[in-house]
Amino acid sequence: MNLESLYRQVIMEHYKYPKNKGLVNDDSYQTVHLNNPSCGDDINVQIKIVDGKIIDIKHDGHGCSICCSSASVMSQTLMGKTVEEAEKIINNFLTMLKGEEFDEEIEMMDARVYQGVAQFPARIKCASLSWKAIEKGINESK
Ligand code: FES
């Protein structure tokens, strides 16, 4: 199996069996709603931060396979991280999506599978939507 089909398989697994999907009705979570203006798809992300650490992330919404799988990957990658660690990972991920040089040393787990998205500018917004939402959630909870 080549790397590209492995990556595609990881994306489809997260799309079919998303992690941390479904919102909670709890005021201790910061909720952010964002949409992708180019297609109308939208997503809600919730984040709970206690003592500078992300203790829970939830997401829900509709979007393409890249967008929904990326929300699942984002929740899995950032769960349990400190705000500082999460900010570094988010920045690194968004840099990678733009096709720019990113820090290979930063542990991004399954998020690495979106590296190829940089070649498809129209899909960058799909892959980055939930990550932009969580970034906003972190900033709003400061
Ligand atoms: Fe709408 Fe990907 S096509 S988020």
Image: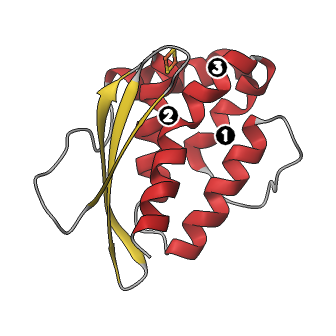
Relative to the observer, which residue lies in front, 57 or 133? 133
Q: Secondary structure at mark 3?
A: helix
Q: Secondary structure at mark 2?
A: helix
For disc 2, the marked residue is 70
Residue at (81, 56) in percent of width and height: 103
CB of mark 3 near ligand 1 (< 8 Å): yes
Q: Residue furthest right?
A: 101
Residue at (61, 28) in percent of width and height: 125
Q: Earlier in the sequence, mark 1 or mark 2?
A: 2
Residues at circles 1 and 3 in contact by the CB criterion of under 8 Å: no
Q: Position of residue 115 (x, y in %)?
A: 73, 32
Q: How many marks?
A: 3
For disc 3, the marked residue is 123
Residue at (20, 69) in percent of width and height: 28
Q: Residues within 10 Å of mark 1 (few under 14, many from 20)?
A: some
For disc 1, the marked residue is 112
Relative to the observer, which residue lies in front, 64 or 16? 64
